[in-house]
Image (cartoon, rainbow, N blue to C red):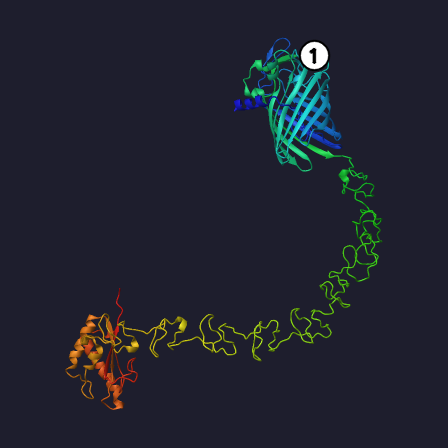
Amino acid sequence: MRKLLLLIAVCVSCALAQIGLAQSESGLHAPSAMTLGQGYLFVSGSFEMVSNGETASMEGYYTADGKQVDLGRNTPSNDENLFVSFGVLDNLDLSFSVPFHYDGDIPGDDFNGLGLGDIQVAGKISFPLSDWIYLGLGSEIIAPTGIENKGFRPRHRWYIERDGSSYAYTAGNWVVGANAYLTIVGGEFVTFNSYAALLKEVGADETFVLWGGGFNIFPEKMLTLILEMSGESPIRSSHVHRSVLNSPFRFTPALKLHLPHDAFLTVFADVGLNYFRSDDLDNGLPVHLENSSSDIDFTISGSPTVSMGITLSKTFDFSWHDDDGDGVIDRKDLCPNTGRNQVVNARGCPVDEDRDGVLNIVDMCPGTPLGVIVGRDGCPLDFDHDGVPDYLDKCLGTKKGFAVDSTGCMLDTDGDGIDDNNDKCPNTIPGDPVDSTGCPLDQDHDGIPNDVDKCPDTPSDVSIDLMGCPLDFDQDGVPDGYDRCPNSLSGEIVDQFGCPNDADKDGVPDTRDLCPDTQEGVAVNSDGCRVDSDDDGVFDEEDKCPRTPAGAPVDSLGCAIDSDHDGIPDWMDYCPGTLAKVAVDIEGCPMNARLNFNSMAQRIKFKHGDTTLVHSSYTALSDVIAAMRKHPMMLEIQCSASDVSPDRAQELSEARARSIFNFLEMKGISEDRLTYKGYGSKLPPTQTQKNGSSALIRLVPVLMKTEP
């Protein structure tokens, strides 16, 4: 860590700084090249305490008789300083500094105590080279006001003569100096301050150089980081290296807190060069301290290893600038940009801002241009009361109530000679004759004056009658010039083109359309309804089989239904429940009698007027059972009883159907696959037997869906 700080010190040792504390708003040891500004007062108070944990000298001290006295403990040592600077001119500051010093008890002698140091008086002139570079020159005089018989540690390098003679709190002689400053402003991020000075002690043969520099990081923020290097050493032709390194040489980090009302609080630490090297007598300065009671000799470090300090500063505004020349200084001027020769109040604001002769407190128009004639209320005169002041009015005699433009002249947008305020038709076509209200004498330009025209809004391209109304031959309300159907029937509802209304656009007028909501684009008949040529319930444009016989059941596409998929449509199929893949004849019945349920049904007989089956019926029923066991199907049993009186027919027909049902169930056919029903004297008609069937028994197979 020490090596790193030593490297930093060596790298920036060519920068410049001042030995002193808080002598401007910017920097700590290194003040800014910029001045305060005329009338500003800067006051700074500082306190610095040496606290390095070591004794005040490197080997104790020697009395005049050669006796060595050890310093067994660290001796308290601190410095206080009051600095005051005032801006006499914008580029000239004058300042003075009053220091006080304190050293604690020194064993064996009476050097301790508080005492006044050498008072410094200085001046500084600033030269701004640009908005970001400033150069400053100054001079200073240091009076030997410090007490001589107090203190142990010499406070400055020039207090120690070439032979080592020194006082702790004073140089003992007058000192004069010349200073040079440089400040570079890097916006709101960083400011660099540097300083160099040559000091000459009157009556002595040595000249001293003070040097250093520092950066203020974020100088405009609430908290500013300061990093500085500073030093002081004699100018000698021999032992230059030793005279520089054994003289005060310090690195100073600090934090500055910006307080309200241009006040600043800064906390800092001075780290001396001896912090980075061994405590060796060869690295110190021999001192012969003179005192009224006795003289002593000892060796001290060029600068204390570590010291801590704090400063409190504030800027006061006593400036007397008056930039606008109104007699009120800027810091009290609430209106700093008042025009020349204006009368102002105690706050610097104009009594009559627009200088129209009417005071601001009663001036209703405070921004009147200079030289304009105004009334008692401070507003420009308006002779014709048109709302345009006379100084802008190019038509001073405008009649009261007339509309005017920005120049005060009559405003007539349509150029018909009637001002806009009185023009009831403000958009008249240029050149149209108008009446006293600004409206056209022939509003629709059809050649019929408005007072005769019964249709004053007739379009310009329409033929009209003597009353100015459009001709309409068929009296449908559409002028002939626009009527595409000029011969519409009387009373017929027409559209905007004069043609009969056809809401569904099927070509049949609404008055004759029996189907007014027909879908657009479909074929319709003369009544406006969709066409179904084969009367199968499917319209022609959707009918895939447009010639289906009348009455034949069809599907959604208009094609005849073939329920059992035997190739014979239902309307021709005498055996509608034919099993799959069974060969059929032209009537749709299986060619194999044992698979033809119509044939099986004809072979089933009951005794006359009874529910008892004749013996030959069981052969047919066996064929039914065999077919049902082989094929997944259901069977509907229909029976009639024409061999008994009608009042018994229904009961007997149901009993006969149940008899066949019971027989098939007994033979192992599940009742879930069987249904039965009696129909009385006669079975109902089928698709192929429109007048009903003469058979007594009908077996209707229904194929069951099988799992895939």
- Above or below residue 125? Residue 700 is below
Left or right: where does residue 509 sit relative to residue 223? left
Can residue 199 be seen?
Answer: yes
Left or right: where does residue 10 sit relative to residue 399? left
Q: Quadrant of residue 17?
A: top right
Residue at left offset 45%, top offset 71%: 522
Circle 1: residue type: Asp
The residue that label 1 is drawn on is 205
- Above or below residue 118? Residue 513 is below
In x, y percent, where is residue 161?
67, 13
Mark count: 1
Residue at left offset 63%, top offset 8%: 65
**Nearer to me, 424 or 262:** 424
**Nearer to me, 157 or 620:** 620
Q: Residue furthest top?
A: 65
Q: Quadrant of residue 61?
A: top right
In x, y percent, where is residue 437?
76, 67
Residue at left offset 65%, top offset 69%: 461
Q: Quadrant of residue 114?
A: top right
**Nearer to me, 144 or 510:** 510
